[in-house]
Image (spheres, rainbow, N blue to C red):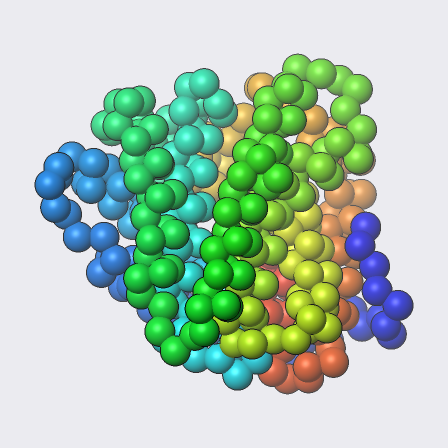
Amino acid sequence: MITTEAKMVTSETVINFDLETYLKDKKAIVDQALDDSLPIIDPEKIYEAMRYSLLAGGKRLRPILCLGACELFGGTQTMSLPTACALEMIHTMSLIHDDLPAMDNDDYRRGKLTNHKMYGEDIAILAGDGLLAYAFEFVVDKTENVTPERILQVIFRLGRAVGARGLVGGQVVDLDCEGKTDISVETLNFIHTHKTGALLETSVLSGAILAGASEEDLENLTLYAQNIGLAFQIIDDILDITATQEELGKTAGKDLTAQKATYPSIWGLEESKKQAQKLIDEAVNALTIYGEKAFPLQAIAQFIVNRKF
């Protein structure tokens, strides 16, 4: 677990913040921006496939974290919205590819048929590739009122998060571990800090970088982001066991069927919940120095550990 020497504050400290309204408002902004970002042009088939998955719904957690981190340090929504959209494009790419038969092989995502079930495996692969490439183009083309140096830092972090040092590397180790019964917590942490956590961390740090956050601020946010990233995956593993397909929007029980090592398979459900809560408490504590300005990000941390889908 990632820790801090600052005075511990539990996640219950975050009060009097209307997270439901905050998430609803931010999601509406992101959804509209994503719709506007990707018009259908020739060849229509690939743009339709890209839009099908990009606009299929979801919590939009990564773009919202980007917007929230930027606003925490005095930045504006205009500054961070292109990067927020790019993060969702990259995340959507990862879902399209993850659902393919050669990977996790799922027929449903966000309550709808997966991309390859709608358009075929060939177009699904290309739709993911198209979204990944477009994400970088979109950041450079659409970001306003931000210095080139900060935009370059964001591009660097996006590339690292999605590559072999991030998502791709985590996915490779995850695939290698399927069917093995002797996976350690350390290996599981490696998989998920790369496969899931890297993009969540980049979402937070990118927003802060665009607003001109200091190195000390980025260290605090790294602590926050790494903890919520790991907690997010622990809760995902729990929900794979406890939630229904309708609640998840994808096939439930896939981890057990694929004989994947999960946190509940190592710790059990109750201990997994306790570990997730500890991580969230650490995340909340990392941002207490910012006072009420940090309430949105702290409340999102609480949402992660308490979510039901």
Query: From the viewer's perspective, is 102 left or right of 169?
Result: left
Query: From the viewer's perspective, is 287 left or right of 209?
Result: right
Residue 11 picture quarter: bottom right
Is residue 239 shown to the viewer in this render? no
Q: Nearer the viewer, residue 196 or 161?
A: 161
Q: Residue at x 19, y 40 (%)?
A: 48
> What number of labels is visible?
0
Residue 278 against residue 54 in the figure, above or below: below
Q: Residue at x 11, y 41 (%)?
A: 42
Residue 36 against residue 108 in the figure, above or below: below
Residue 131 picture quarter: top left
Query: From the viewer's perspective, is 156 left or right of 124?
Result: right
Residue 143: x %, y % from top left: 36, 68
Is residue 213 shown to the viewer in this render? yes
Q: Nearer the viewer, residue 298 or 136?
A: 136
Q: Residue at x 42, y 61 (%)?
A: 83
Residue 222: x %, y % from top left: 68, 61
Q: Residue at x 37, y 26 (%)?
A: 107
Q: Nearer the viewer, residue 293 or 262?
A: 293
Q: Residue furthest top?
A: 179
Residue 156 against residue 181 in the figure, above or below: below
Residue 124: x %, y % from top left: 31, 29
Residue 188: x %, y % from top left: 72, 33
